[in-house]
Amino acid sequence: MSIARLQLTGISKQYPAVKANDGVCLSVAPGQIHAVLGENGAGKSTLMKIIYGAVQPDAGQVLWNGQPIALKSPAQARALGISMVYQHFSLFDTLSAAENIWLGLDKGPSLAELSARIAAVAQSYGLEVDPQRPVHSLSVGERQRVEIVRALLTEPKLLILDEPTSVLTPRAVDKLFVTLRQLAAQGCSILYISHKLDEIRALCEHCTVLRAGRVTGEVDPRTQSNSELSRLMIGAEPPPLRRLPTKAGALALGVRRLSLAKAQPFGTTLVDIELNLHAGEIVGVAGVSGNGQQELLAALSGEDPRGQPGSVQMFGQDIARSSPRKRRHLGLHFVPEERLGRGAVPGMSLAQNTLLTRTDRGSVTAWGWLRTARVQRLAEHLIARFSVRAGGAGAAARSLSGGNLQKFIVGREIDAAPKVLIIAQPTWGVDVGAAAQIRAELLKLRDAGCAVLVLSEELDELFEISDRLVVMAQGRMSPAVPVAQASRAMIGEWMSGLWNLGAGNAQA
């Protein structure tokens, strides 16, 4: 048998509040696509950071091509041929995509030469990256592409991908899989972390399952069902969603001919957006990232108050130029697609992060004084209600796994009992159990009379929870269609802007 490209033996890592890895053993062969599966907080990301040199283990041994190594930094890992795409992006917002990639390469061509290489690699792999665009102007899906292209440019011998498809469209995922199979055929080993069981079964030939920091099984995912993988990962199958019949109520959020010039050079201009969102329904918004979703979210949440008077109304009240605070006072809550930096402040505790949008429950006095005990209790309530794995209300947001932080942020807004909830990428990077929990909570909100607008690049998710669907393409919005009358093929076609604008008004 050939020598393993990477072999881990007895890897352990203890943090103050949790043992992230406990005696983990793992072996990856040359040219193998190897999945690492586990629920949120199982220790997957910590293990990958150890392999990449970003975190040092407390115990255990790492072998590279049969030789023991002690990785002290990502630069040392890259020198060996190890490259990693993080779940939480490591990009500078004020720099362009090319500049970010250039900084991540230890040696390389000039910036101009690199820009040409980026464009060529992006085109050949179908990842659509504009080297000159500043990162702050990119959607989450577009930033994901930048990270993947940066990793591919290093021509790695071991490529680590942590939730690489969480915000990619189905077409982009298909293209990425073609790329990964090509890399594997050329001898590149791939460690693939994903909560999407269908992807793992379609792509990977071996799977190591982690639970609470320990290896609980090794299987060939191609021979396992989704149910069997779920049981290995979380000990049970996620409960099925219960969709109760509902009848839409009063018009909660109305958008009328909303047009907005792009606020920055690489943005998208919104053109005559029309949308009706009623109490007691979920409307899903599909589309390839970068087609105006960010701009729509900013206009609806109050981050961009340039809307024409009357273009955005909530229960008949004009809020087009109202602040986010005023909109929250009226009952509109918002979950952005970016967890760290917008949904939560990384260095602040979970208790402090509740104050970003939640000053109810008497946590702040009329004179602006904080009641810290009540802030603490609110955070503890959210942790318990939404099964967040964290070291208590005082834990820093950055210390949580991506899925657990997502549960906390989503829970913070759901717990506020909003009248209108706008949520982007609700289950980005969360395990199957947590995804089922979040979707069930959204359905409960709908059943309680809340109007819910969900923007997601997960078509399966939109079909599962939405009552009606719309599509955004090139800054325009399609007519709404009931989910029962839609198909994935039709929605995919609409993502190119190919809907019949003369088919009548389906917005009512």
Image (spheres, rainbow, N blue to C red):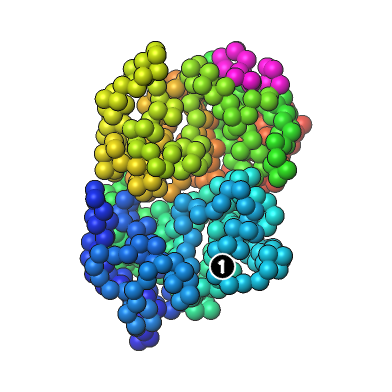
The relative height of residue 217 versus residue 17 in the rendered view (above or below) is below
Image point (60%, 19%), residue name? 322
Q: Quadrant of the C terminus?
A: top right
Picture coordinates of residue 395, whole percent (x, y): 30, 41
The relative height of residue 416 versus residue 315 in the rendered view (above or below) is below
Q: Which residue is mark 1?
A: 105
Image point (70%, 36%), residue name? 263
Q: Quadrant of residue 359?
A: top left
Label 1 sits on what residue type?
Leu
Picture coordinates of residue 277, whole percent (x, y): 57, 24
Q: Is residue 401 left or right of residue 341?
A: left
Q: Is residue 317 magenta?
A: yes
Image point (71%, 21%), residue name? 308
Number of disc labels: 1
- Provide the residue span drawn in magenta: 308-322
Residue 169 in view in this figure? no
Q: Is residue 353 magenta?
A: no
Element under disc 1: loop
Q: Is residue 67 left or right of residue 456?
A: left
User: Main structural element of the magenta stretch: helix, strand or loop?
Assistant: loop
Name the foreground residue: 451 vs 54.
54
